[in-house]
């Protein structure tokens, strides 16, 4: 069923929904696990003192799970846990960190949890939205 829209609104909406449907958590998690496994297989050393593995994870895996996260942010605890599992497994496989808790591993590696980063971005986006709405309100008041 087609809705009539102005200009290219319909095409834009269809394009946006198509891109958003590719961001469902199971697909994102699967791709992220694959990339993190490739990183761990490519490097001979898994020593945590060498930041190469962490930089590779931040560069190649983290963007997969953080892309447009304020838009498609997982609403259920199971989806959030699945996404966090990517980083949890990766940090556990680094030499010398297997027996540490997840938060200890993050502290030792100097990175934040994916959930904390997602919440920070959501807060930032809400702040930007609030500031924008305040500016438009000030403009309306000053024009009157």
Image (spheres, rainbow, N blue to C red):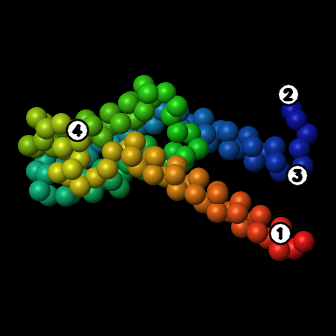
> How far, Cα to Cα, is label 1 from label 3?
32 Å
Q: Name the residue under label 3.
A: 7
Q: Quadrant of the N terminus?
A: top right
Marks 2/4: CA distance?
48 Å
Element assignment for label 2: loop
Q: Where residue 11 appears, x then y in whole percent?
A: 78, 45
Dividing the picture into quarters, in which one does residue 138 lie?
bottom right
Q: What residue is disc 1 on?
A: 141
Of pointers 2 and 4, the one earlier in the residue sequence: 2
**Residue 136 point in image, percent of width and height:** 76, 65
Pair 1/3: label in front: 1
| Residue in the image at 13% along x and 48% along y | 46
**Residue 2 percent across, percent down from the top left:** 86, 33
Near mark 4 (Cα within 10 A), the count class, few <14, some 14-19 or many ≥20, is some
- To which quarter of the image does residue 97 belong? top left
How far is the residue under mark 3 from the one under mark 2? 17 Å
Please name the residue that numbered disc 2 is placed on: 1
Residue 110, by quadrant, is bottom left
**Dot placed on the residue nearer the N-terminal end, 3 or 2:** 2
């Amino acid at each position: 069923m087609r809705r009539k829209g102005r200009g290219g609104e319909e095409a834009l909406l269809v394009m946006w929904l198509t891109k958003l449907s590719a961001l469902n958590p199971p697909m994102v998690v699967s791709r992220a696990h694959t990339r993190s496994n490739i990183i761990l297989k490519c490097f001979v050393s898994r020593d945590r003192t060498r930041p190469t593995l962490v930089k590779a994870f931040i560069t190649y895996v983290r963007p997969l799970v953080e892309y447009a996260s304020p838009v498609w942010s997982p609403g259920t605890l199971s989806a959030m846990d699945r996404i966090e599992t990517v980083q949890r497994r990766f940090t556990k496989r680094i030499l010398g960190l297997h027996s540490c808790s997840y938060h200890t591993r993050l502290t030792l590696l100097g990175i934040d949890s994916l959930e904390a980063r997602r919440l920070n971005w959501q807060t930032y986006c809400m702040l930007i939205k609030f500031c924008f709405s305040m500016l438009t309100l000030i403009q309306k008041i000053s024009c009157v």
